Image: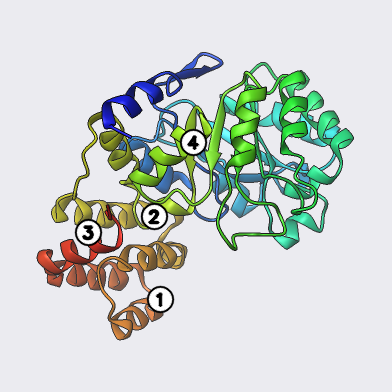
Amino acid sequence: MKHFTLKKQLEKNMAFSIGSFQLNRGLALSPMAGITDNPFRKICREFGADWVVGEMISGDPTLRHTHKTLHRISHTGEEKPIVMQILGNQPQKMAEAAQFYEKIGADVIDINMGCPAKKVCHTYAGSALMQNETLVAEIIDSVVSAVNIPVTLKTRLGWNDDNLNVLTIAKIAQEKGISAIAIHGRSRTQMYRGEAKYDLIKEVKKEVSIPVWVNGDITTPQKAIEVLAYTGADGVMIGRGAQGQPWLFQEIRLFMEEGRKIILPFDLISRTIKRHLSDIYAFYGDNYGHKIARKHIGWYLKNLTNDRAIKNQLFTLDNSSQQFDMLCQILQQAEVEDYYYRYRSTYLQD
């Protein structure tokens, strides 16, 4: 498809509103537990994500003041809208949680019905809720009625491949007042295996009038455009695709608007990585920050070096300062040509 034709098609549905918040491109960062924290959300927003969702927060009131929750609800220095995602299976508790988080600064509440983790589904929360459409309706109704801010929904195609009921869930969501829905193109039992499928998301978009984000396996600008064009979705919600490349949002925007692929300057990549780590250390403290940083370093290094010995040495350091200094050395030693070659051949493929 020629770019100008595709651009015209996308412009019809890439700008929409959720409550009073206008989204110009529909580029969203998906909530990921242990990943989409305050430092990562800010980095992704700087690179063009116009909607970022925080890590899931339990609807259980006894967990609101734990070390983990206090970090998850911190949005210091972030732009609006502040989107907080709640997790649970009891309508009243979910409603009370939504009210609490609205009071402390949430602009939007997102309901988690997509998490496939065993420890979540064993409590009949997350994507396990899709097995009970009546309970889905009760939870949505309770939460929407309890707050004065928009409520969105994150879900999957269904519990398993024999029960792909996302269209029914989406219609319930619209009827009960959900402002937008994000759909991951897998069932719960698939976890993250195989490839995401988008046929049902395309069908949902045809059948409901609320904005729809398509989610799953979107790791390149080309894939983002292809999926948007196929499904007619209002935007893409990117999760694992942003790990180690938060600049993906900027690349999608440029590809969408101008039809051109870019190779970001290495000094920008380097500065972004170092600033991200510095923010992690400041946010979590030196004693804990280096542990959080390890997974992000692993994703960043995937495109920078294949030297397993260096990675192993870096991951064994238990000091933030030493960890940062060693990473800086790796970045300084990285040859631009080698980086460009690998990045171009593995990422920006025609």
Q: Is residue 107 above or below residue 316?
A: above
Q: Amino acid at mark 4?
A: Tyr
In three-dimensional space, the C-alpha distance between marks 4 and 1, rounded to whole angstroms, equals 46 Å
Q: Which residue is mark 3?
A: 344
The color scheme shown is rainbow
Q: Amino acid at mark 2?
A: Ile
In this rendering, the label closer to the viewer, 3 or 2: 3
Circle 1 SS class: loop
Residue neighbourhood size for the residue with mark 4, other residues' Cα within 10 Å, grouped as few (<14), some (14–19), many (≥20): few
Q: Is residue 185 above or below residue 337?
A: above
Q: Amino acid at mark 3?
A: Arg
In three-dimensional space, the C-alpha distance between marks 4 and 2, rounded to whole angstroms, equals 37 Å
Q: Say whether disc 3 or disc 2 marks the residue closer to the N-terminus.
A: 2
Residue 262 as seen in the image, left or right of residue 193:
left
Q: Position of residue 11 (x, y in %)?
A: 38, 21
Q: Please state which of residues 247 and 189 is positioned toward the viewer in this rendering.
A: 189
Residue 338 as seen in the image, left or right of residue 235:
left
Quadrant location of residue 212?
top right
In the orientation shown, which residue stands out farthest toward the bottom?
309
Q: Which residue is mark 4?
A: 230
Q: Position of residue 148 (x, y in %)?
A: 67, 16
Quadrant location of residue 105?
top right
Q: Say whether disc 3 or disc 4 marks the residue closer to the N-terminus.
A: 4
Tell me which residue sits at (58%, 62%) in the image.
194
Circle 4 SS class: helix
Residue neighbourhood size for the residue with mark 2, other residues' Cα within 10 Å, grouped as few (<14), some (14–19), many (≥20): many
Q: Please state which of residues 183 and 290 is positioned toward the viewer in this rendering.
A: 183
